[in-house]
Amino acid sequence: MSAAVIPVEQIKTITMSIYRYDPTVDKKPYMQDVIVEIPTDKDIMVLDALHLAKEQEPSLSYRRSCREGVCGSDGMNINGKNGLACVTPLSEVLKRDKITLRPMPGLPVVRDLIVDMKQFFDQLEKVKPYLITKSDAPDIERKQTPEDRDGLDGLYECILCGCCSTSCPSFWWNPDKFLGPAALLQSWRFINDSRDEATEERLDDLEDAFSLYRCHGIMNCVSVCPKGLNPTEAISNIRNKLLTRKKA
Amino acid sequence: MFSKLGHGSKEFLVIRACAVLILLYTLYLGGFLILTDEVNFNQWSAFFGNTLNKILTSTFFLAFAVHTWLGTWAVASDYLTPRIFGNLGRILFLGFRGVVAGVIALVLTWAIIIIW
């Protein structure tokens, strides 16, 4: 998509204000304006515009892989709101031909738009995001009724991009104690799985004052999720389960 | 049932139960103010002279104290932490908790003395 091959009448100039920080060179982060020529005959994605910016600034760093909203690599803060660059149409976020890109907030910046996701994945690991079974394995597979399977809709689709957790103030303030919306959505995904046999243990792990209960229902997670999922509802479901379960 | 809940669940329920009590008392007091033609000293004195109203008002202040104590703990443990302020965070947290405890004790004591 080189600007050189596009007819002049189909080109528009936009300003991309991009967060830059290379800890090996820069003492502190700064915003850099990159002027980019984009085609007007089609709507490109923010990621496409970033590729154009990188042609001018080869040192510009960001993660990307599938470029179709599946891998969850290119989560970033677009005009103040987290989202995936690859599935965000530029036309939706351009304001007066300008767009501002920053790394996802709340996590340490590795370089430019790349953040260190360790804390995010540490919290995910705590909820044991895999099926736990105690009974003997059946000959072929652990079956579910179609109704039970329906209970996983809206949960299994999470791609772990981190947009939700890094937009959550509770996660910003206590990223080591509050599990965050992404991990809690996964927690509910397995608590609500009819094949899982560790529900009580999973709930016990969430009984403290921080892991789950630090959610204040701000709902930034719902607002930014690029897959349209609802972590707040998942958290609410876990809370209801905690409050109504009959403990031995 | 309640005793078997974990710390987080207990706190969640208590803070909301207190909020409901505060709301109910506010509506009750609001109802008195609206339904009374002229609120003068005699009416006011008679209202708070009633034993039931004394108990309700005391319950309100108790709920207010618990709600404030738990609520401000949540706020302080978000913002006044070593993660944000380094070692000063612990001092700020404890100092803030001390001030809140003092204010709550003062308000509660004062209220009980006035009511009873």
Image: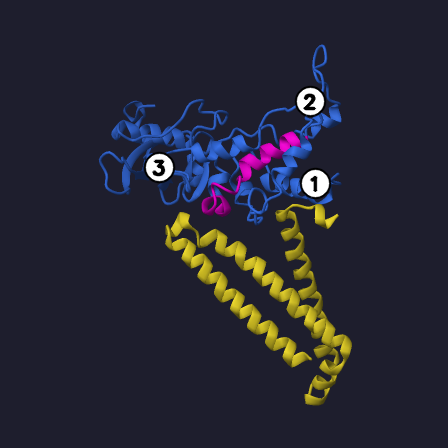
Chain colours: A blue, B yellow
Q: Which mark is residue A209?
A: none
Image location (x, y in percent) of residue A150 = 70, 28
Q: Residue at x 60, y 77 (%)?
A: B110
- Which secondary structure lies at badge 3? strand
* A1 in magenta: no
- Which secondary structure lies at badge 1? helix
The answer to whether the residue labelled 1 contacts the one labelled 3, judged by CB atoms less than 8 Å apart, is no
Which quadrant: the C terminus of chain B? Answer: bottom right
Gap in Å between the C-alphas at discs 2 and 3? 41 Å
Task: State whether residue A195 appears in this view.
Answer: yes
Give the residue number, with chain letter if any, for mark 3.
A109
Label 2 crowd (10 A; few <14 / some 14-19 / many >=20): few
Amino acid marked by disc 2 = Lys
Chain of the residue displaying label 2: A
Give the residue number, with chain letter if any, for mark 1.
A241
Q: Which mark is residue A134?
A: 2
Task: State whether residue A84 appears in this view.
Answer: no
Which region is colored magenta? A168-192
Image location (x, y in percent) of residue A9 = 32, 31
Amino acid marked by disc 1 = Lys
Q: Earlier in the sequence, mark 2 or mark 3?
A: 3
How many numbered circles does the render carry?
A: 3
- Which secondary structure lies at badge 2? loop
Amino acid marked by disc 3 = Val
State which quadrant residue A34 falls in: top left
Chain of the residue displaying label 3: A
- Asked if badges 2 and 3 are on one and the same chain, I answer yes
Q: Earlier in the sequence, mark 2 or mark 1?
A: 2
Is residue B41 found left or right of A81 in the rendered image?
A: right
Q: Residue at x 77, y 78 (%)?
A: B51
- Viewer-closest of A102 and B18: B18
